[in-house]
Image (cartoon, helix red, strand yellow):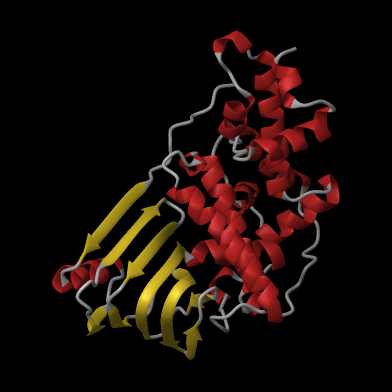
Amino acid sequence: MSIDTAPAPVERYEFSSTDSAEITDYIDRMYAGNRTRFLDVPPEAAFAARGVATDTMATDRVHSAIGYATDAEPFEYLVFEHLIAGRYLLRGGEELLMRPGDVAMVPMGVGLSFEVHDLDMSLLRLPMDRVAAAAEGQVGAPAGGLRFHSAQPVSHAMGRYWRELVGVVHRELMDPDSSMCNPLVAEQTTAGIAAAALTTFPNTAMTVDYIRDPGPITPMALRRAIDHINANADQPLTLTDIADAGGVTTCALQHDFRRHYDTTPLGYLRRVRLERAHAELTAAEPETGQTVAAIAERWGFAHPARFAAAYTVRYGRPPTDTLHA
């Protein structure tokens, strides 16, 4: 089976200046509704930012030797921050003074103000609807009702986990040869980050007792969901896509997949993609230059070692043996 491997759109941008007017204009354009004022401008002062944006997320790295303060309108998307160096004060719902190494989530729906000095920070931007969809799929939380309670992680351990996870995603996105250009990889990564955010930062999906057993769905609905997975395994499917195809809720779909297949819908999707990769490896002619890594990435497996491990468990031998058989 051939699949559409057209790269997903990736926008890369970079900015550097020592001119206060240019810097103010850049900040106001990048983060709509901002009003920036400078606090200290040493002779060697400079501001630099570079970033990458995809259809599902964006990441930035910002350096500023200029101290500045910014007032901002409420954000309509989630911003996660990792302070690498400098001083950073966030006000918005709560006041948070971050130290190097700290991570935080910028609150949504409230006016914000920031004050920074000698800043070195990485940021990850994520649409709220992706996180809300993850909450609905995991615990049945109504997508429109998700709220975050605090900008700070639930614990130091979860903060460390989040910092390391987002660091991996940041480096991968910044890489010019990033596998995030593959829409299957980008979709799976976004879903993973959204799910991790729900376990890292306090939110209503943690504290409200949702109904976890919605009861069985009809065999026809389950068959429609499976048929949709099989017909579209080469596309960046989400849990919501699969549930919509079955005409059921994501919570009900999760429940029945676990009951009938001992996995989640997205776990089932990974099984199908592994089978498709196996079929390509079996049919491939090594002399044509086909590689295990290239076939794996086409089917959404960005890490060759993890693919090889999963493949060996499923088929009893490494994928290289299949390719060269």
| Residue 283: quadrant of the picture | top right
Q: Is residue 178 above or below residue 32?
A: above
Left or right? Give the position of 228 relative to 56: right
Does residue 179 appear anywhere in the picture?
yes
Left or right? Give the position of 297 relative to 24: right
Left or right? Give the position of 232 relative to 88: right
Q: Position of residue 269 (x, y in %)?
A: 68, 41
Q: Is residue 270 above or below residue 321?
A: below
| Residue 175: quadrant of the picture | top left
For the point 55% across and 60% down, the residue is: 166
Q: Position of residue 218 (x, y in %)?
A: 76, 50
Quadrant placement of the C terminus: top right
Does residue 249 appear anywhere in the picture?
no
For the point 42% across and 77% down, the residue is: 86
Quadrant placement of the N terminus: top right
Q: Position of residue 78 (x, y in %)?
A: 47, 70
Q: Is residue 16 above or below residue 317?
A: below
In the displayed orientation, state which residue is furthest to the front: 43
Q: Is residue 143 above or below residue 295?
A: below
Front residue of 296 and 46: 46
Q: Position of residue 187 (x, y in %)?
A: 54, 48
